[in-house]
Image (tube, rainbow, N blue to C red):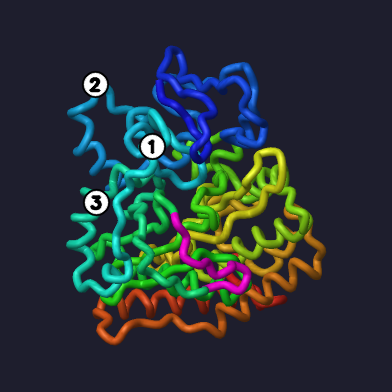
Amino acid sequence: MTNVFVNRAAVGNLSREEPANKFVYDAGVPPAQAVSLLMPVSPEPYFAERATVLHPVFDMSLPEGSLRDALSAMFAKALPVFDDLALLEVVGRSLIGRLRFGNSPAEFDKVPEQNLASLLEYRGTAELFRDLLERYAQFSGVAGVQPKLLIRDDGSLKIEKLSPVIEKRERITTHGTTHLLKTFDAAKYPALATNEHCCLRTAARAGLRVPAAQLSSDAETLVVGRFDLKNNGSYLAFEDGCSLDGRLSRDKYEGSYEQLAGTLARVLNSPAGLEVEMGRFVRSLVFSVAIRNGDAHRKNFGVLYDDATAEVTLAPTFDVVTTMAYISNDSLALTLDGSKRWPNFKRLLRYGVQRCRLTPQSARNIIQEVVDAVATDEVQLGKEATAAAQEVTALMRRGWQDGVRSLRDSPAPTAQE
């Protein structure tokens, strides 16, 4: 049995049972501290799909890819069973969002500090990442196939302000993780850190809220600030598009953007109004189309809230890259109008109006603003860029040009229409 916490407050326990894993709330838990918008506080237990998987909100942050492999190598032999619940128990002290797992809150204060400013100047961060993996893997409850870690900065890093709608934070005192460190397989995905850094910068210029990010001096590592971190050092709740629809992470490429829009519209309730929040979602999707990001799946959209019974807002845009630079024939991650072909202006305009409840003028303005930002921004490289990196950025520029052409108002007919 594993104790479940919302930040440092105990709210229930999760147990391995047959025929399905079970979560039960403690008595007296306030409704605001529900573990998920789909799991309101109740005396009745919540059962997972079956014994070998977790509830979607707990499954959401399970490590994938190389990080999961590393954790398996570290802990599988020491544990009688190394399933999803066991993995959650290993990394549960530090997850994206406000949920925590462990025996007591005292365990949450043991994340070691790292001087991230020095790390960003270090030459050869690929080798350094292997050392950091030993220290931080067990504190890295974060999904995603590419190598990444959750890290606690020692206060050294002054993150640049990438977006006018994200307030620049002063130094925050916290014992939890503060940043996400992302690296990549240079053989498979050269210049991926540069790719994402460029995309985040352009997303901010396109009017999107994005997490602050800095690229290492050797362009091999990207350090991204946690957008769920509050000024008091605690965390907001985060739920992604799989969790919000009661799906496991394995289903992140299943379904349609129409379904995703419906899921978000059911839970978003910002005082700014549903049209504003859904407009932010449409802007993010349009941006992915414009830069030819074919990995805008369910898990790369989500919501934030501090109270499960109150305001729920769209999370900032994150994990955006030009995937066409690596997959020349890439397409949408989910279907739109029953197809994964890249949509043109008319299809996205219709989607914004019919599925996301925008006015035609609002949807048109969003598309135009994104197109203008992508069309006028530049993909930039450092002075010591490798030949592979130069090739990737050339492919990025080509992808952006293709995206911009497809989204011009009343574009000329193309082979996709």
Q: In the image, what residue occupies the spot 52% across and 79% down? A: 401
Q: Position of residue 259 (x, y in %)?
A: 65, 44
Asked whether the beta carbons under mark 3 and mark 1 sit within 8 Å of each other, the answer is no
Circle 3 residue:
133
Q: Is residue 221 left or right of residue 76?
A: right
- Asked if the stretch drawn in magenta spans residue 276, the answer is no
Q: Which numbered disc flags the more N-terminal residue, 2 or 1?
A: 2
Q: Which numbered disc flags the more N-terminal residue, 3 or 1?
A: 1
**Disc 2 to disc 1, how far (Cα)?**
25 Å
**Where 135 sits versus 341, above or below?**
above
- Asked if the stretch drawn in magenta spans residue 163, the answer is yes
Q: Where is residue 174 in the image (x, y as percent from the top left)?
A: 43, 53
Q: Which numbered disc flags the more N-terminal residue, 2 or 3?
A: 2
Circle 2 residue:
80
Q: Neighbour class for label 2 at 10 Å: few (<14), some, many (≥20)?
A: few
Task: Please tell me in which quadrant of the rendered image residue 390 appears.
Answer: bottom left
Dot 1 lies on which element?
A: helix
Q: In this view, does 182 lie to the left or right of 11?
A: left
Circle 1 residue:
106
**Disc 3 to disc 1, how far (Cα)?**
23 Å
Q: Which marked residue is nearer to the observer: mark 2 or mark 1?
A: 1
Dot 3 lies on which element?
A: helix
Q: Nearer the viewer, residue 335 or 269?
A: 269
**Where 215 sits versus 320, above or below?**
below
Q: Neighbour class for label 1 at 10 Å: few (<14), some, many (≥20)?
A: few
Q: Where is residue 213 in the image (x, y as percent from the top left)?
A: 44, 68
Q: Position of residue 228 (x, y in %)?
A: 53, 53
Q: Is residue 383 visible?
A: yes
**Where 20 sits versus 331, above or below?**
above
Task: Please tell me in which quadrant of the rendered image residue 1 appears.
Answer: top left
Q: Which segment is the magenta one? A: 162-173
